Image: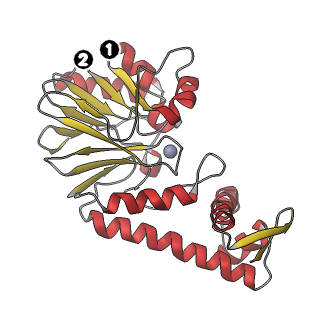
Amino acid sequence: MEIAPGVHSVPLDIGGFMGFFAPNVYLLLGERRALIDSGWADEMSRNARLEYLKAQGASTLAYIVITHAHDDHMGGAEGLKKATGGKVVVHRCDAESGRRYLGSKEVDVMVEDGDVLDLGGLELEVIHTPGHSPGHICIYLRPQRILFSGDQIPGMGTTAIAPPHGDMVQYVESLRKLLLWDIQMICPGHGPVIKEPQRKINELIQHRLEREEQVLSGIERGMGTIDELVGEIYPELDERLIPSARGQVLAHLVKLEHEGRVSQFEEGRYARR
Ligand SMILES: [Zn+2]
């Protein structure tokens, strides 16, 4: 499906990963071609992606650019690399975990903030946006003002920030950094395309600040442990979601501790400073 000139969302009609858990894979068509992210590793997803590439005359790729080294974004990289010859591109800080996903295979290209990948007629600018993972990157197409946001800005819901791998200070800083870019459309790693980028980014920052206030206010009222805070902030939470809620509360506590606003006066028990 073409979403802008030379920019396709590679559809996945079959396969078990639907809804929020279906990762988006994008195909960029310059004189040479690249994918942004590679989806899950399962054969059905991979074959469906390859079919689509073939139909677009894109059987060979220059790059497979990975926004971050998580299974749903990087799992398919090795298989797609074998089939298309695309070089696997990962930020230096995620390359180690990237190598783990790719088994013994090396990450082909390690990038840093500000690097540019030239497809001929299409330039991919790398923006380092740590937080969800240490080496998370977004990709910017300048003339088109399109941002590929990976999990930094999801098309729906919010992104899990799980310490120590995830870092809430960095995540919020990365959101603020993206506000400085002239973006007209965001193509996220999950969910639909975002047409009002500035509003979405501001909403995400606002959401995290509100959560942070809830954590602080809970602590002030004597709820000093993660479990007490989870019970307070998410009173009717489905049991299956408790581990991820604990992770989010911990991420806020780590941020607040880092900022000197709370401290642990005994292991696992927090108070205002
Ligand atoms: Zn992720």
The CA distance from mark 1 to mark 2 is 6 Å
Q: Residue furthest bottom?
A: 221
Amino acid, disc 1:
Gly
Residue 244 on image: x %, y %: 64, 57
Q: Is mark 1 within 8 Å of ligand 1?
A: no
Instruction: Count neighbours of disc 2 (C-alpha within 10 A) and say few if under 14, some if 14 to 19, many if 20 or more.
Output: some
Give left or right: position of 260 versus 170: right
Amino acid, disc 2:
Thr
Q: Secondary structure at mark 2?
A: loop
Q: Is residue 211 above or below residue 164?
A: below
Q: Nearer the viewer, residue 156 or 240?
A: 156
Residue 190 on image: x %, y %: 40, 49
Specify whether residue 158 is in view: no
Image quadrant occupied by the C terminus: bottom right
Residue for badge 1: 85
Q: Are marks 1 and 2 in contact (CB under 8 Å)?
A: yes
**N-term-proximal mark, 1 vs 2:** 2
Give left or right: position of 142 versus 114: left
Residue 165 on image: x %, y %: 62, 45
Specify whether residue 51 is in view: yes
Residue at x 14%, y 27% (from the top left corner): 120
For residue 60, the mark is 2
Residue at x 37%, y 53% (from the top left corner): 191
Q: Residue furthest front?
A: 260
Image quadrant occupied by the N terminus: top left
Q: Secondary structure at mark 1?
A: loop
